[in-house]
Image (spheres, rainbow, N blue to C red):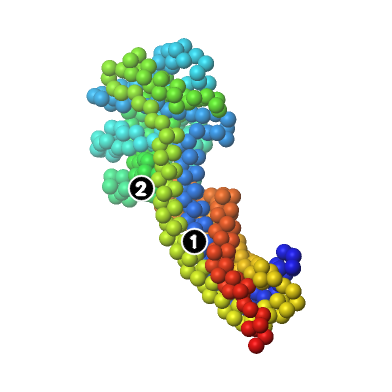
């Protein structure tokens, strides 16, 4: 009996017991769907981390950053144009370009808010954003950002504390540094930290135009530099050497510490930890597959006992025990693979549905999407096929070992 004939026979047998086959498939489906959902969300979190903090392989370049932390005077800038020129000469050809990267998020400033002089947190924007929701007023226009107009948006909690209501804060002024800003909008409070554990740039007290904040001498100095490399260059090694050079020769070497954080290394550690977590949770979810496998075995034993006459007829017309065993084994595999493929589709759909809901529940501008890979598909197919083989082989052997004489009696 050929494989095609065995497959047709298997499908006919399963259709003959539709309810029983359907319930058995559901058991496999649930187990596979749970595993795929967990893997899809876990892979999505890892991919999100790489997209935000990893090297930009999609654009054909890598970027790294070196930071300066002052030990005593917070007004000291770690980098100036002279440092940039020195790095270009010292490391010529080892990176594509280097520039001072002005900080835009969670800057601590002393400001005059109302009649109170206080420390506040500030983030800088280049253009209007969809990541905040306004309570009152409006966002500065794109033209106002580009022109560097002295306008600002204030957090709701600060507005209520200083002026009683968000509406009362509109039109008031805030003095940051030597610039006086007019409040044109008040936005909903946001958490101080994001899903990844980093600072949330929208969880600050004020949002100001970057074009105006960095002007004059401050435009050629800062506490962060960005190194840009072509793909294939040793970004981590070169960045480490640059940081060591700055510790000895930087313009503020005696006033603070230059640090390079190897994000790729940290991301690999995070991905490894995430893999352990998802594997552990998937193992727990896979227990349902074991239970479903027992259901498959039970169904096949019942099928074998109900089809004793059919087995006898096949043996009488020349079928071998191997043919009988293969027939029942294929039925078990068809049953579990069908459940596995349906489980993969359901799991992938659930992962893509749950991930955005998780991001929305967390808020803070977090964007999270599921990432279902071809490896997940192969896992679903291979696991479901294995369950059919493992839990179907004993009933299939029982069918193959039936004696024709005993059946005729």
The answer to whether the residues at label 2 and label 1 have Cβ atoms under 8 Å apart is no
Residue 310 horizontal/vertical position (percent): 68, 80
* Spatial separation of the CA atoms under disc 2 and disc 1: 31 Å
In the picture, which quadrant includes the N terminus? bottom right
Question: Residue 274 shows which numbered tag?
Answer: none
Residue 399 horizontal/vertical position (percent): 61, 75
Whether 259 is drawn above or below 105: the answer is above
Residue 352 horizontal/vertical position (percent): 53, 55
- Residue tagged 2: 191
Q: Residue at x 59, y 50 (%)?
A: 374
Extreme residue in the front direction: 405
Q: Is residue 215 visible?
A: no
Extreme residue in the bottom direction: 409
Residue situated in front as seen by the camera: 306 or 322: 322
Whether 95 is drawn above or below 408: the answer is above
Q: Quadrant of residue 329?
A: bottom right
Q: Residue at x 33, y 15 (%)?
A: 248
Q: Residue at x 49, y 25 (%)?
A: 234
Dot placed on the residue nearer the N-terminal end, 2 or 1 = 1
Residue 75 horizontal/vertical position (percent): 29, 24
SS at badge 1: helix
Q: Quadrant of residue 197?
A: top left
Residue situated in front as seen by the camera: 210 or 224: 224
SS at badge 2: loop
Label 2 neighbour load within 10 Å: few <14, some 14-19, many 20+: some
In the picture, which quadrant includes the C terminus? bottom right
Q: How many marks?
A: 2
Depth check, mark 2 against mark 1: the one in front is 1
Label 1 neighbour load within 10 Å: few <14, some 14-19, many 20+: many
- Residue tagged 1: 34
């Amino acid at each position: 009996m050929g494989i095609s004939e065995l497959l047709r026979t298997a499908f006919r047998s399963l259709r003959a017991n539709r309810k029983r086959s359907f319930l058995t498939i559901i058991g496999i489906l649930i187990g596979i769907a749970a595993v795929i959902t967990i893997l899809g969300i876990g892979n999505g979190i890892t991919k999100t981390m790489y997209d935000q903090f990893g090297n930009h392989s999609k654009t054909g370049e890598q970027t790294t950053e070196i930071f300066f932390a002052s030990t005593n005077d917070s007004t000291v800038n770690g980098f100036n144009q002279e440092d940039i020129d020195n790095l270009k000469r010292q490391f010529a050809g080892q990176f594509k370009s280097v520039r001072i990267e002005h900080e835009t998020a969670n800057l601590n400033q002393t400001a005059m808010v109302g009649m109170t002089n206080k420390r506040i947190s500030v983030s800088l924007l280049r253009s209007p954003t969809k990541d905040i929701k306004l309570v009152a007023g409006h966002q500065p226009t794109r033209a106002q950002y580009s022109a560097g107009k002295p306008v600002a948006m204030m957090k709701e909690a600060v507005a209520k504390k200083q002026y009683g209501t968000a509406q009362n804060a509109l039109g008031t002024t805030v003095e940051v540094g030597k610039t006086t800003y007019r409040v044109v909008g008040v936005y909903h409070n946001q958490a101080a930290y994001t899903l990844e554990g980093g600072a949330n740039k929208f969880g600050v007290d004020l949002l100001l135009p970057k074009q105006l904040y960095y002007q004059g001498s401050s435009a050629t100095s800062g506490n962060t530099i960005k190194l840009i490399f072509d793909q294939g260059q040793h970004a981590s090694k070169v960045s480490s050497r640059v940081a060591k050079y700055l510790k000895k020769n930087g313009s503020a070497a005696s006033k603070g510490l230059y640090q390079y954080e190897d994000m790729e290394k940290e991301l690999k550690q995070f991905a490894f930890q995430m893999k352990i977590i998802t594997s552990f949770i998937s193992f727990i979810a896979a227990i349902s597959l074991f239970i479903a496998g027992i259901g498959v075995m039970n169904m096949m034993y019942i099928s074998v006992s109900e089809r004793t006459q059919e087995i006898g007829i096949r043996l009488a017309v020349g079928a071998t025990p191997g043919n009988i065993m293969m027939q029942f084994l294929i039925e078990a595999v068809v049953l579990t693979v069908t459940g596995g493929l349906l489980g993969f589709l359901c799991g992938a759909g659930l992962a893509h549905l749950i991930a955005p809901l998780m991001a929305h529940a967390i808020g803070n501008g977090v964007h999270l999407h599921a990432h279902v890979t071809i490896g997940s598909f192969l896992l679903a197919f291979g696991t479901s096929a294995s369950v059919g083989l493992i839990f179907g082989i004993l009933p299939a052997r029982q069918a193959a070992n039936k004696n024709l004489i005993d059946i005729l009696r």
